[in-house]
Amino acid sequence: MHRGNKPYHRPGVLPGSAHKTLCRLGAALLSGVNAFSRFALHSGRPFFSLDEAALLAKSRKLTGLDDFGDHSFREPLGILLRSFEADADLNLVGRICAHSEVLRMLCNRLRMVEDRRRHPGILDEPIRRPLFITGLPRSGTTFLHALLAQDPRCRAPQIWEVMHPSPPPERGSYDSDPRIVHTERQLKWLDVLMPEFEKFHLIHARYPQECIAITDHSFMSYVFETMYQVSSYRAWHDGQDKLPAYAFHRQFLQHLQWRCPGTHWVLKAPSHLMALEALLHVYPDADIVQTHRDPLKVLPSCASLTRVLRAPFTNRLHREGIASEVTLRWEGSARLALELRRRNQAMGERFFDVRYLDLRRDPMGVVRGIYRHFNRELTDGAEAAMQRFVTENPKDKHGVHRYTLEEFGLDRETEWRRFRFYTEQYGIDPEP
């Protein structure tokens, strides 16, 4: 099942100034819609319910199904929905998006349970030696994920099949499945909602998707706190055992590979740092690549991305609050991962560390190091496909992402001291 590099071209996107003008017009329209909703519709509550019972009933009606499978998702769903109402201060666009996304996930759960009822062999699918990429956000995880996914023998979950996993994809129609076109139409709304997003993160229906878009179906996922200001959900989620989320993650991979397998999965999410123990419990033979970068570059970049992601959905957005959230989140995550590795030094060979600057300077050297460390075969075809990807996707291809610590109220010396345990452990030098 050759995927190569062609799927990452984005057809149908307007060139240059015309595209920017359309995005500006769309942003102005959204601003007007939200202003009207605050005046007349009370943020859309009468029309887009976030009531748990109503959403469950609507998903059953839309699918004609009623079995959600394991009911462990009910408690996190209820807490998330209450946090949307209590914490997020959703505008009309935010309420519409939260309503439609929760409904999509519930419908996906219903359909996937029905798929497994009809085809019980899905749950017998073995997941062998998956390769997980994790690390601080903005440290090259997305680029490395897309690069390793060029290996035509592997499987990386693509955005279209994660958004619409039922029925399970088939090898013969994998490159022409009608869900690809449908998903690409949906993704074009990102150009309107978040015209800056492309500078941060390449996205297309055929592009590799990260794992938070799989675990969100269990409603135990860091995707929600990334997109919305859901502080009470975040506080609850931080204290939970993540095993149910990773158990569902495994079922999701079994579903996608049933009729469309590969030699191994290539997966990615910075948030795996917070749950390595659960990940390794569910995937005891996993190989893990951990990327590292100067935290003084990571923090403002991550804060800036969070601002861009949340801005369309809320009536209020506080930069310094975002910065505090980001700093505490990723300091804690780096400590969790470091402590797990120190406690389990016998697992050292299961990890491979990649410095961001090395990845930018010599991406194929990093790839060869990964394959060599984990004793995997790097074929000539895979290496050639990866080299094409590197050539065709230079840094800042879609524009320069500009940010500073100071614009988010972060102090350089304070943050460097905060992360000294991390920079000293992994030999991370300050970036220019």
Image: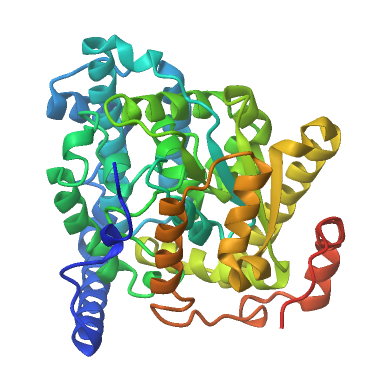
Above or below for 7 versus 223: below
Identify the residue at image location x=45%, y=53%: 380
Report the coloring of the rendering. Answer: rainbow
Q: Is residue 402 visible?
A: yes
- In the image shown, does 287 or 246 lie closer to the viewer? 287
- In the image shown, does 346 or 210 lie closer to the viewer? 346
Residue found at the far front of this picture: 380
Above or below for 432 versus 372: below
- In the image shown, does 204 or 381 lie closer to the viewer? 381
Q: Is residue 118 left or right of residue 394?
A: left
Above or below for 168 versus 418: above
Q: Quadrant of residue 328?
A: bottom right
Identify the residue at image location x=21%, y=82%: 15
Q: Quadrant of the C terminus?
A: bottom right
User: Residue 214 in the image: x percent, y percent?
Assistant: 41, 38
User: Residue 139 in the image: x percent, y percent?
Assistant: 61, 63
Above or below for 104 versus 317: above
Residue found at the far bottom of this picture: 17
Q: Quadrant of residue 410?
A: bottom right
Q: Quadrant of the N terminus?
A: top left
Q: Is residue 400 left or right of residue 121?
A: right
Q: Quadrant of residue 109?
A: top left
